[in-house]
Image: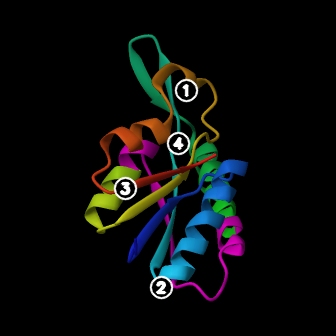
């Protein structure tokens, strides 16, 4: 099977590093374009009946960290691959699904577990959500 447009989600975890490695190998062997997507989400704080966003300096810290994560991803993709790198704010699973649909990804690659922590336990993993709702094939790397 040949792919033309591979989307790999990267959050900086060990399994997302493995996902980039697999996606890079697939892109290189098939001549596909590779898009590396890092989705960050500035948390909201729930205080009873209302939601509060974090102070601006915390939001900036999330942005700065996200840029560092994306730079790490750039170092993991061989220069021989036609790759683009995207940074988007949003809910990780929905953002991955939307980006894949809007940009014609014919394969989505992601690690089986990321850096979700307690949120993953309560709401379910990003990889599970993407796998259940994606229109394109999904490769989950363990």
Region rendered in magenta:
72-95
Estimate the spatial distance between the alpha carbons at disc 3 and disc 2, rounded to whole Å.
Answer: 18 Å
In this rendering, would 74 be left or right of 94? right
Q: Residue at x 29, y 68 (%)?
A: 104
Applied colour scheme: rainbow
Horizontal side of residue 62 vs 123, given as left or right = right
Q: Position of residue 103 (x, y in %)?
A: 30, 68
Image coordinates for residue 23, horizontal then vertical, percent: 56, 67
Residue that numbered label 3 is attached to? 137
Mark 3 or mark 1, which is nearer to you?
3
Q: Where is residue 117, by image quadrant?
A: top right
Indicate the position of residue 44 as horizontal and vertical percent values.
49, 31
Which residue has dot 4 on it? 42
Question: What secondary structure is marked by label 2?
Answer: loop
Q: Is residue 91 visible?
A: no
Q: Tag 4, which secondary structure?
A: loop
Specify whether residue 92 is painted magenta.
yes
> For numbered disc 3, what is the local secondary structure?
loop
Q: Are marks 4 and 1 in contact (CB under 8 Å)?
A: no
Q: Are marks 3 and 4 in contact (CB under 8 Å)?
A: no
Query: Which residue has dot 1 on it?
Result: 119
């Amino acid at each position: 099977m040949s792919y033309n447009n591979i989307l790999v989600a990267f959050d900086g975890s060990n399994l997302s590093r493995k996902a980039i490695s697999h996606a890079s190998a697939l892109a290189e062997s098939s001549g596909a374009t590779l898009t590396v997507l890092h989705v960050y989400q500035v948390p909201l704080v729930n205080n009873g009946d209302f939601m509060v966003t974090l102070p601006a300096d915390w939001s900036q810290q999330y942005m700065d960290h996200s840029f560092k994560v994306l730079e790490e991803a750039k170092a993991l993709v061989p220069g021989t691959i036609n790759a683009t790198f995207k940074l988007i704010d949003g809910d990780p699973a929905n953002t991955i699904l939307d980006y894949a649909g809007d940009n014609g990804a014919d394969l989505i690659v992601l690690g089986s577990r990321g850096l979700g922590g307690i949120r993953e336990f309560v709401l379910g993993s990003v990889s599970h959500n993407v796998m259940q709702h994606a229109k394109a094939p999904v490769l989950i790397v363990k």
